[in-house]
Image (cartoon, helix red, strand yellow):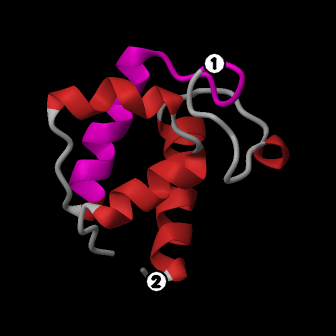
C-alpha cells in the first residue's frame, strides 16, 4: 500500500474534520495514533457518519452501515489504512 495515499487520506480526514465539519482540533496534537473517538479527535456518531460519507465521495470507497460505529475505536492512522484497504483511489 503506497504510503503517499495513506498520507493523503490522513490529511483529508484532518482537513475535513477541522475545516469542513468545524470540529476544533489542534493540528499539532493530532497524529497517526490519535483516536477518532473519545480521548482523541472526539468525533460523535453523527460526525463519523458525515466523515465516512465524505471519504466515500472523495476516495471512491464504500462503508457499509455496520462498519461506521467501530470506526470510533480506530486511530487516525488505522482509519487511513482502512480506507486505503477498501481500494481508495486518489
Question: If the image is split into quadrants, where does the C terminus sit?
Answer: bottom left
What residue is pinned by disc 1?
38
Which picture quadrant has residue 83?
Answer: bottom left
Compared to residue 33, the image places residue 71 above or below, namely: above
Disc 2 crowd, CA 10 A, few/some/many (<14, 14-19, 20+): few
Residue at 56% in and 69% down: 7
Magenta residue span: 38-58
Query: Horizontal placement of 8 versus 28: left or right?
Result: left
Q: Position of residue 9 (x, y in %)?
A: 47, 62
Residue 58, visible in the rendered structure = yes
Which picture quadrant has residue 19?
Answer: top right
Tell me if residue 55 is in the magenta stretch: yes
What residue is pinned by disc 2?
2
**Outermost residue, right direction?**
28
Disc 1 crowd, CA 10 A, few/some/many (<14, 14-19, 20+): few
Tell me if residue 15 is in the magenta stretch: no
Amino acid at each position: 500500500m503506497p504510503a503517499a495515499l495513506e498520507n493523503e487520506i490522513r490529511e483529508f480526514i484532518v482537513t475535513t474534520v477541522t475545516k469542513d465539519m468545524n470540529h476544533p482540533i489542534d493540528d499539532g496534537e493530532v497524529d497517526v495514533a490519535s483516536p477518532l473517538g473519545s480521548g482523541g479527535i472526539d468525533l460523535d456518531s453523527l460526525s463519523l457518519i458525515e466523515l465516512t460519507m465524505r471519504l466515500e465521495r472523495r476516495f471512491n470507497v464504500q462503508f457499509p452501515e455496520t462498519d461506521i460505529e467501530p470506526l470510533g475505536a480506530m486511530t487516525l492512522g488505522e482509519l487511513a489504512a482502512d480506507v486505503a484497504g477498501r481500494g481508495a483511489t486518489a
